[in-house]
Image: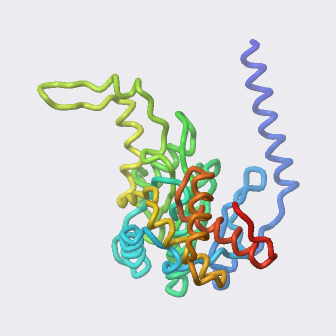
Amino acid sequence: MLMNNWDTLYSRTEMLLSRLEGLLSTDQPAIPWDTALAFRWRKFGRTGFIQPVTHLHRITLDALRGIEGQKKLIDQNTHQFVHGYPANNVLLTGARGTGKSSLVKAMLNRYAATGLRLIEVEKHDLTDLHDIVEQIYRRPERFILYCDDLSFESDEPGYKALKVVLDGSIAAASENVLVYATSNRRHLMPESMRDNLDTRHMEGEIHPSEAVEEKISLSERFGLWLSFYPFDQDQYLEIVGQWLAYFGIHEMAPSLREAALRFALGRGSRSGRVAWQFARDWAGRQKAGNVTEL
């Protein structure tokens, strides 16, 4: 009897919320496909819509250093995609601050004139991927669904939704949609020692545990993996010099070199992001007449 009362209450609550959502929701404006290049998926209650990005972060491939191999592979894949040839979903994983997100943005900047568009989807909205694809699969443009800094815990709903969109739905994949995702985790999920302890060895062969197989199954649905690694000292200093030149500082004096290394040491990382942050800091100090030891 108590269970029936809870079911009735739940049904009435659902009905009330649906009615309230209908009263509060407003008609969304037409999507400016011809003028906007990048979009975000936004939610209003339970209703999602595609919102144009008004202030686009533009970055060119030439501005990204130290990742030449990764640039070549993703550029080749994106070129195939925008020209209607077979191409793969892309997973960019590895060290933080090494250009994963910037590389995806550079692809949009490079191929926007050829019809490429980008839709950014937050992790908690991945359950709406099917709805997003339904809105764009008839469009003539080519769309990258972009998921930044992606990682999952066990049993998150977005995990299964992404698996289905990548490779696993009864519906055919849309030819004008690819998924580009960045992550610090190669398999997108935390890996524990227990998972490896359950691995079985049979007649000289290694058979991963079911937990490991499940965690690998999502990343394997991306046809192209790009791995990013921490920069060595020379690569870091080269990128520092590039960004200093961007700010009008073209000479890398020994004292400036040492300051850049101390800056990286203080942050525990030599990366493109840290190089950019140092160059901004140093250029700002110089222009403000406040160049002191960092």
Q: How many marks?
A: 0
Name the residue: 42% across, 70% down: 175
Rendered image coloring scheme: rainbow
Decide if residue 105 is on the left or right side of residue 87: right
Residue 164, image x, y percentages = 46, 49
Which sits in the foreground, 206 or 138? 206
Residue 30, image x, y percentages = 73, 76
Which sits in the foreground, 78 or 22? 78
Q: In the rendered image of this protein, does residue 129 appear above or below residue 112?
A: above
Q: In the rendered image of this protein, does residue 197 appear above or below residue 32?
A: above
Q: Give the farthest residue toward the front.
A: 254
Q: Give the farthest residue toward the left.
A: 203
Decide if residue 121 is on the left or right side of residue 114: right
Residue 69, image x, y percentages = 36, 69
Name the residue: 68% across, 76% down: 56
Q: Quadrant of the N terminus?
A: top right
Residue 288, image x, y percentages = 81, 76
Name the residue: 52% across, 73% down: 138
- Can residue 123 be seen here? The reply is yes
Name the residue: 62% across, 59% down: 263
Which sits in the foreground, 168 or 22? 168
Q: On the image, which quarter does residue 187 sit in?
A: top left
Q: Quadrant of the C terminus?
A: bottom right
- Can residue 130 be seen here? The reply is no
Q: On the image, which quarter does residue 75 sit in?
A: bottom left
Q: On the image, which quarter does residue 210 sit in?
A: top left
Which sits in the foreground, 238 or 115? 238
Q: Give the farthest residue toward the top.
A: 1
Q: In the rendered image of this protein, does residue 53 appear above or below residue 171?
A: below
